[in-house]
Amino acid sequence: MPLALRIEEHGGPEAIRATDVAVPAPGPGEVRLRHTAVGVNFIDIYHRSGLYPLDLPSGLGLEAAGEIVAVGEDVTDLRTGDRVAYAGGPPGAYAEERLYPADRLVRLPDDIPDEAAAALMLKGMTAWYLLCRTFPVAAGHTLLVHAAAGGVGSLLVPWAKHLGATVIGTAGGETKCERARSLGCDHVIDYRERDVPEAVAGITGGRGVDVVYDSVGHDTFRGSLDCLRRRGMLVCFGNASGAPPAFEPNELAAKGSLFLTRPTLFHYIEDRTELETAAAAVFDLVRAGVIEPGVNQRYALKDAADAHRDLAARRSVGSSVLVP
């Protein structure tokens, strides 16, 4: 039987358990997939730890690429043998095979490899909605991107440069700072060595940035607010260091009529047309050489706990994939 990784309770990486599962024939609107590559993302850690609680027991993982091995009786636009990818629920991508809703799959173009798709679907479409929908970035904007050398950051930076923005990135340590520079950051701040709001003020002549993209959460939240210009926007889209602290909404007025949003990808791709638009934008920029999958860590599926430990400890650079 196919191998799947599941959790019976929320907890640390040790909560991830391998088990053999019986995958039934697909029902109406479903396909059965054989995964070839599985993406690893911070949201998987949030699900495992209980920061974003799941109904237990549960599978893990929201992103993968693979091949269709069977289709439900009413699925007409996909067929056995098609290469496809997805990013979204229900959790369960950490598996050799699974069932998945056919209408949430994207057919892979011949020139997009499976590993690239598994590394890019969730993070790439996240970069798309952040830059093109939440705060539409254009030439002349100045951005601050936290974790600029990370999985989403490594896509946000070159994509924002492609749109004509000035990009300030933060990273920890010289290796990651150099990675951020190589991705196209105009300025890089080592948060271990410098006060980020003070550095941003120096770079912008005291004006602040138009938008901060913050996937770190607790450790950066208040500093991010202090980096914004009047009527600037803080986009909190992750909690790598834990949930942001509580604060009074009046602080937004006191700091310059700021905007604060906490978006999630799945509200931007619920509509089938938006899903296809997002995926096509990602694939187009891969073809153009603007963004790269950046798969720098590969783990056997059974070693997903090690991938979680490395990601949480910020030992990962770029993207990580599990190989079934």
Image (spheres, grey):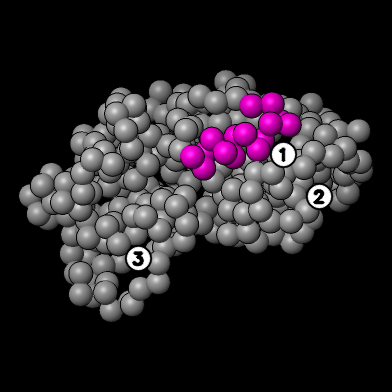
Residue 103, position as x, y percentages in the image: 71, 48
| Distance between the alpha carbons at the discs numbered 3 and 1 | 33 Å
Q: Name the residue under label 3.
A: 260
Residue 182, position as x, y percentages in the image: 30, 25
Name the amino acid type tagged 1: Tyr
Q: Nearer the viewer, residue 69 or 315?
A: 315
Residue 296 versus residue 238 in the image, above or below: above
Q: Which residue is drawn at 28% across and 79% down?
A: 250
Which tag is nearer the camera, tag 2 or tag 1? 1
- Label 2: state its secondary structure: loop
Q: Residues within 10 Å of mark 3 (few under 14, many from 20)?
A: some
Q: Which of pointers 3 and 2 lies earlier in the amino acid sequence?
A: 2
- Can residue 81 be seen in the rendering of this structure? yes
| Distance between the alpha carbons at the discs numbered 3 and 2 | 38 Å
Residue 77 is inside the magenta segment: no
Secondary structure of the magenta portion, mostly? helix
CB-based contact (under 8 Å), mark 2 and mark 1 = no
Q: Which residue is drawn at 38% across and 28% down?
A: 290
Q: Mark 1 points at which residue?
A: 94
Q: Which of 194 and 206 is in front in this view?
A: 194
- Can residue 200 be seen in the rendering of this structure? no
